[in-house]
Amino acid sequence: METNELNYFESYEDIEIHELMLRDSPRNEAYRKAIVANKDYIQNKIVLDVGSGTGILSVLCAQAGASKVYAVEASNYAAVTKEVAAENKFEDIIEVINKRIEDTELPEKVDIIVSEWMGFYLLHEGMLDSVIYARDQFLKPDGCLFPQVAKIYAAPCSMPSMFEFWDNVHGISMQSVGKISRLFKSLKPEICVINSDDVLCDPKLVRSFDLKTIQIKDLNDIQLIDIAVASKEGTYQGFCLWFDVEFPNFVNKTESPIILSTSPNDQPTHWKQSVVILPQEIEVEEGTPIAFEVKLTRCEDNIRRYNIEFALLDPNEIEHPMGCDCFMTKCIVAKVFVQNQSENTEIST
């Protein structure tokens, strides 16, 4: 196993990481709600839990009536998963396999794959690759995944904690220090909670993934060029990324899908939001067009990480949605496309 892979799995032997996730109520409640809502569908089904960790999802599926749950966990926490299964009296249903999913062999195909594979801005950690592998190797043709759809969103935002703090540090203006701090922080995404009031525009959908059909190669390069329109007056200080995942609802198909959202408008999760900090702030009025380009490119030397590139664009030089109410007069259909990008993280203004 390569060093990066070994370090990744060893990091999940830290109890604090698991406790952080187990204390994440929106995360756990969304999975619980989705599994309970589909209890009649899960009854007597065979389930594969990819990256089972402490085993919470395996136990939920067993409680819902699964006849068999294969809990695959590459880290040494697999031993804890066995204890949790026994503690909840499901040791005869939950079979724990202490291997990477890529090294696992199962005696049968499964009806359902359940996994909590999401990382910061959805793709950090690259665990979706393992879910796709499990899908292709072990899922029955008519099987399903929990979750089954994932979406990345983006929006310009204010970051008052990164800017206003430096105006008055114990009675002293420290804007010069703040500028250096922001330049340093702009080299990597800031993981923090964004107040919903600090989001300046309606979110833009960067990409939607159907886990039944997505391929690993589709995750290597993601790009969006678009224009957001400021919904209010404010200060443009950063660019915010978050994600939603949707669970199927086979029992009540007429109801809306169950969603786990990491949006600033929803209860905070341990993923928070991922923000690219602008070196300089920009004042915007309601209706101001904010043109941007965002790229997520998988690192060549560590496939579990991505480089995020962000650039401010001139709204008059890119194609624009029809019928909007911003200050621009040129309005034609916006273009969204994907292409290969450099591996260096860049922020340009």
Image: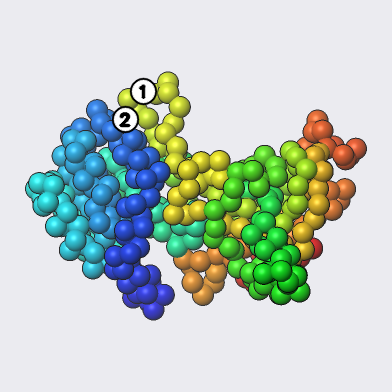
Q: Work out which quarter of the rendered image holds the N terminus and state it.
A: bottom left
* Count of numbered circles in the view: 2
Q: Which residue is mark 1?
A: 252
Q: Is residue 201 left or right of residue 134?
A: right
* Residue found at the far bottom of this picture: 3
* Spot occupied by residue 116 in the image (x, y as percentages of width and height): 37, 51
Distance between mark 1 and mark 2 Cα atoms: 8 Å
Task: Please give the name of the residue rendered at 58% of the width and 63% of the height, measured from the top-left corner.
Answer: 190
Q: Tell me if residue 8 comes above or below residue 53 in the rendering.
A: below
Label 2 CA crowd tier, 10 Å (few <14, some 14–19, many 20+): some
Q: Secondary structure at mark 1?
A: loop
Q: Work out which quarter of the rendered image holds the C terminus and state it.
A: bottom right
Q: Is residue 65 left or right of residue 156?
A: left
The circle drawn on residue 270 is none
Q: Is residue 103 left or right of residue 258?
A: left
Compare marks 1 and 2 and give the one earlier in the sequence: 2
Question: Which amino acid lies under the numbered mark 1 shown in the image of this protein?
Answer: Asn
* Spot occupied by residue 250 in the image (x, y as percentages of width and height): 35, 28
Q: Which residue is mark 2?
A: 37
Question: Which amino acid lies under the numbered mark 2 shown in the image of this protein?
Answer: Ala
Q: Tell me if residue 304 comes above or below residue 214 in the rendering.
A: below
